Image (spheres, rainbow, N blue to C red):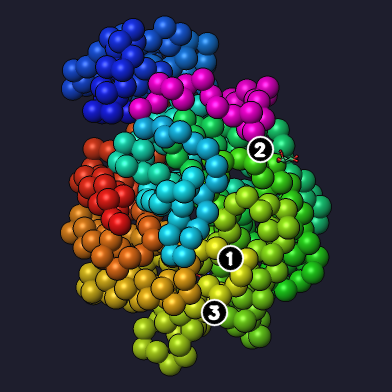
Amino acid sequence: MKLSTSFLALALALPAAWAAVPLYGQCGGTGFGGETVCVSGATCVVQNSWYHQCIPTTAAPTTAAPTTTAAPTTTAAPTTTVTTPTAPSASGFVYTSGTKFMLDGQKFTVVGSNSYWVGLSGLSDADMNKAFSDIAAAGGTTVRTWGFNEVTSNNGLPYYQSWSGSTPTVNTGASGLQNFDRVIRAAKANGIRLIVALTNNWSDYGGMDVYVRQILGANQPHDAFYTNTNVKNAFKNYIKQFVGRYVNETGILGWELANEPRCKGSSGSTSASCSPQTVTNWANEISAYIKTLDSNHLVALGDEGFYNLPGNPSYPHQGTEGIDFDVNLQISTLDFGTVHSYPNHWGQDGNELKWGTDWIIDHAKSQDRAGKPVILEEFGVTSNQPAVYTQWLNNVVSSGLAGDLIWQAGSRLSGGATHNDGYAVYPDGNVYPVIKSHAAALKARA
Ligand SMILES: *[C@@H]1O[C@H](CO)[C@@H](O)[C@H](O)[C@H]1NC(C)=O
Ligand SMILES: *[C@@H]1O[C@H](CO)[C@@H](O)[C@H](O)[C@H]1NC(C)=O
C-alpha cells in the first residue's frame, strides 16, 4: 500500500495518529521515504526487500494458517477498517437500475480486477490485504474471484468442496468457507466488493468436469453438467451452502453461475445435442434457484459474451461454443451481462485494437437493447498492453458499457510476486497507470 493523498487527508483529520503508519500501511522497503513507525498495536514486518508493512502485533505475519475461530462474516466490520484509506462507508447491496449499477441511491462504478488466486493460495490475512489494497490503490471497487475449488484429494491449499466417490462435502473449516470469510473481510477492509463465480468450465480448480466424472463416471460429455439431474442437484446443493452462508454479506456484489460456461470440455466429449439452448436452459434454472435462496445479490452467467450468429466469419460470433449472449441477457433472473476479450486466443492476431473496439461496442449495444448493465469482466493481450488497454478502456467509457475488470491482478506478497500468466498487472508495472486513470474516468462518467 502506497501512502496516498487520501491517507494524508485521513491523517490530517486524525491528528493523534498522523505520525504513525496505519495498520497494513507501508513502513519501509527499498526506495521508501515515508514514516516507519506503525500505529500502536501494529509491528513493521519485512514482507520483502521493497515492502515492509504494519501488521497487527498479535498476528502471525508469515504463516498462512487461518485462525479456526474466525468470526462469522455477517458480524464483519474488522477493526482495521477505519485505518484503511480507501474504504467507503459500506452499507447496503449493489443493485441495478436500467444499465447502471447502484448502491444506496448513487451510481456504483464497477471497475477493478480479477484475482482468482487471492482465496486459493493459502495467503495470510496480511497478504490478502495487500492484494486488495493494491487493487484499491488503482481505483478498483470490484474484484472477481473464485468461489469454488473441487478436490478429490487434499493438497494442503484451500478448497471448498471435496469428493469421495459421488459424494461431495462442503468444507466449512479453516481451509474452506472460513478461508473465504477472510477473503471477504480483506476485500471489505479495502472498500472492495466481490463478484464470485461458483464453478468453472475449465478444469482449473476442479470445475464442472469433477461433478460429471464423480457422479456419472469417466468419459461422459462435459455438457452433462448442464442437463443431468443428479449433477444439477449436486451443484444446487453446493450453491445452497456457499451462497446461503453469505446471503446478508454486503461484501459480495454478485454471484456468477460459472466461469466461461461452454458446451465443450477437456475431459470427455461434447454431446452433438449441446447448443446455445442447452446453456440458456441451465442458466435459467440455476439463476432462478439462486434467487430463491438469496434476493440480496445480483446474479450473472459469467460467460464470454459470444454471439450466436451461425455463418458469421468471426469465431466468437458463430455460436459454436454454445452461448447466445443476447438471449441469455433476457433471462429475468440474470441481472447483468458479462463479456471477455481475448483476441489472440480467438484468431485475431494483429487485429487486437480494432477487433476489441468492435467487440466492446457490440456489447454496449446489447446492453442498451436489454436494458441491463454489461461489464467487460476479463480482457487481455500479452503484447503492447498499455496502448491496447488505453484504447479499449476509452471505448468502455465512450460506449456506455457499465464497467470492466482487467485480467488479472498482480501483487508482490510475502512469498514474492503472484503468478504471472502473461497478463498480471503489478503496481510497479506499465499498465497500472493506465487502469488507474481509467478508473477515475469511469467514476467521473455521468
Ligand atoms: C471448457 O473447459 C475445458 C476444461 O474443462 C477446456 O478444455 C475447454 O477448452 C473449455 N471450453 C472451451 C471450448 O474453451
Ligand atoms: C439474513 O438476514 C435475515 C433477516 O435479518 C435473517 O432472517 C437470516 O437468518 C439471515 N441469514 C443469514 C444466512 O445470516
Residue 284 percent coordinates (x, y): 66, 71
Residue named by callout 1: 334
Q: Are marks 1 and 3 in contact (CB under 8 Å)?
A: no
Give the amino acid at mark 1: Leu
> At 36% from the left edge and 65% from the top edge, which residue is drawn?
401
Mark 2 or 3: the one toward you: 3
Left or right of residue 88: residue 170: right
Position of the C terminus by quadrant: bottom left
- Residue 48 is situated, as x and y percent measured from the top left of the image, at 33, 23
Residue 367 horizontal/vertical position (percent) = 43, 71
User: Residue lying furthest front in this view?
Assistant: 105
Query: Image check: 132 left or right of 289?
Result: left
Q: Is the residue under label 3 in contact with that under label 2 (CB below 8 Å)?
A: no
Please name the amino acid that badge 2 sits on: Gly
Q: Dot 2, crowdedness within 10 Å: few (<14), some or many (≥20)?
A: many
User: SS for tag 3?
Assistant: helix
Give the SS element for disc 1. Answer: loop
Q: Badge 3 local density, few (<14 within 10 Å), some, or many (20+)?
A: some
| Disc 3 residue type (three-letter) | Val
Q: Nearer the viewer, residue 108 or 139?
A: 108
Instruction: Name the residue beneath numbered marker 2.
Output: 176
Label 1 residue near ligand 1, CB within 8 Å = no
Characterize the local packing of mark 1: few (<14), some (14-19) or many (20 or more) Cα atoms within 10 angstroms: many
